[in-house]
Amino acid sequence: MDKNEANRRLIDRINELEKTNDVELSNTQKILLTTDGSITAILDVLFGKITLTTLEQHFEKADKQHARLVNVEEGEEINFREVIMHTTERPLIYAISHIPLKRCSEDVCADLVRADIPIGRILKNYSIESRREIRNICLEEPNDTLKDLFKTDETMLSRDYVIISDGEVLMWIKESFPLSYFR
Amino acid sequence: MDKNEANRRLIDRINELEKTNDVELSNTQKILLTTDGSITAILDVLFGKITLTTLEQHFEKADKQHARLVNVEEGEEINFREVIMHTTERPLIYAISHIPLKRCSEDVCADLVRADIPIGRILKNYSIESRREIRNICLEEPNDTLKDLFKTDETMLSRDYVIISDGEVLMWIKESFPLSYFR
């Protein structure tokens, strides 16, 4: 691959998404769907400090599909977290994360379980070096959870990606928000 | 510090910048000034693949001030690079980087010297794990280089930050663009 083509796949995917669905995404939407930086940091700066509410959080043994997402063996312990980032006024982004317990330091694990802290802020607080690899970006119909949280039936923009640290998948994350947000 | 206050300094700085200078920054400007993700990736997605042109590139021994920026001893060898990111139509962002030679792998060093490859793409091509720490964000008057490149006298938005890898400053970067860009 040409050394200047590192982001080609992302550019093509955004163009394809716009063309196939006959939508025009805003700059902010494009950035939220493709950035390898912290989403929380972006929302913090756009909305003033945002808040995270944990909807669900537990450990479970990975089934085949979940194990594959974070590159562990089936049966290994995974932290499953479902959150909504929001201002005092409105929901912003819904996110699910899967984090293999064995790749998580005690400190990070405690913060994941104990408090409503976004992952971007956890990585920053512990000065964790990492890189993000975007896996998929898509438009999709909302499930009941999303319909209920955002009080809408409209199509969602979603992406999923992994955060890699020390050469291993530290976490898999999926984020979704309604197509009319951040326009 | 409260564990949810990780981005407080950035939020305050953007608010202060807007207030002191009586300007309203666009979402894209705020993101470009504060993100800890790749700027090249953002420009690639907003403009289709962008191009980098190297204006100047050489090694020099660090004086006191440059040594402090990248946390090395005075006299150590530093790669100094001055670039402009642009589309076929227009300039986008001007950037200066200082990279201590001793912290640079041979591959990365070769790409810095040899070809017009943005740093965000170099980090991605070599799967380098890192974190970014924003140092300053400001409005400033353009010097002659900036006036000439952007063909304007208008005020510039600038920021500087360090990319940290393996616990050491891998590079110091300063980026600037005119206040009327990305609105």
Image: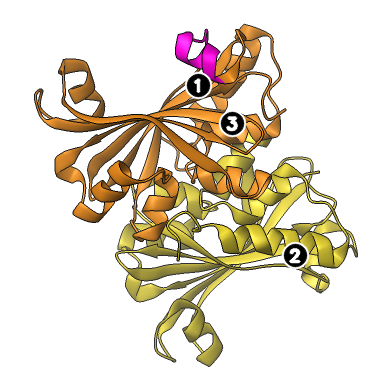
Chain colours: A orange, B yellow
Q: Which residues are magenta?
A: A139-149
Of marks 1 and 3, which one's residue comes earlier in the chain? 3
Residue at the image position 63 percent from the left and 8 percent from the top: A21
Location of residue A157 in the rendering, given as x and y in whole percent from the top left corner: 56, 19
Location of residue A111 in the rendering, given as x and y in whole percent from the top left corner: 31, 49
- In this view, B160 is above or below B72: above
Q: Amino acid at mark 1?
A: Ser
Residue placed under numbered mark 3 in the picture: A92
Q: Amino acid at mark 2?
A: Glu
User: B24 left or right of A27?
Assistant: right
Q: Where the N terminus of chain B falls, by quadrant? A: bottom left
Q: Are marks 1 and 3 in contact (CB under 8 Å)?
A: no
User: A153 left or right of B79?
Assistant: right
Residue at the image position 59 percent from the left and 29 percent from the top: A91
User: B68 left or right of A161?
Assistant: right
Was residue A62 drawn as part of the magenta stretch in this picture? Answer: no
* Residue B91 is at least partly visible in this image: yes
Secondary element at image label 1: strand
How far apart marks 2 and 1 lie (CA) works out to: 33 Å
Location of residue A3 in the rendering, given as x and y in whole percent from the top left corner: 45, 43
Q: Residues within 10 Å of mark 2 (few under 14, many from 20)?
A: few
Residue placed under numbered mark 1 in the picture: A158
- Of residues B104 and A114, which is closer to you in this image? A114
Q: Residues within 10 Å of mark 3 (few under 14, many from 20)?
A: many
Residue placed under numbered mark 2 in the picture: B16
* Residue A139 is at least partly visible in this image: no
Location of residue A108 in the rendering, given as x and y in whole percent from the top left corner: 27, 51
Secondary element at image label 3: strand
User: B84 left or right of B124?
Assistant: right
Q: Quadrant of residue A80?
A: top left
Was residue A142 drawn as part of the magenta stretch in this picture? Answer: yes
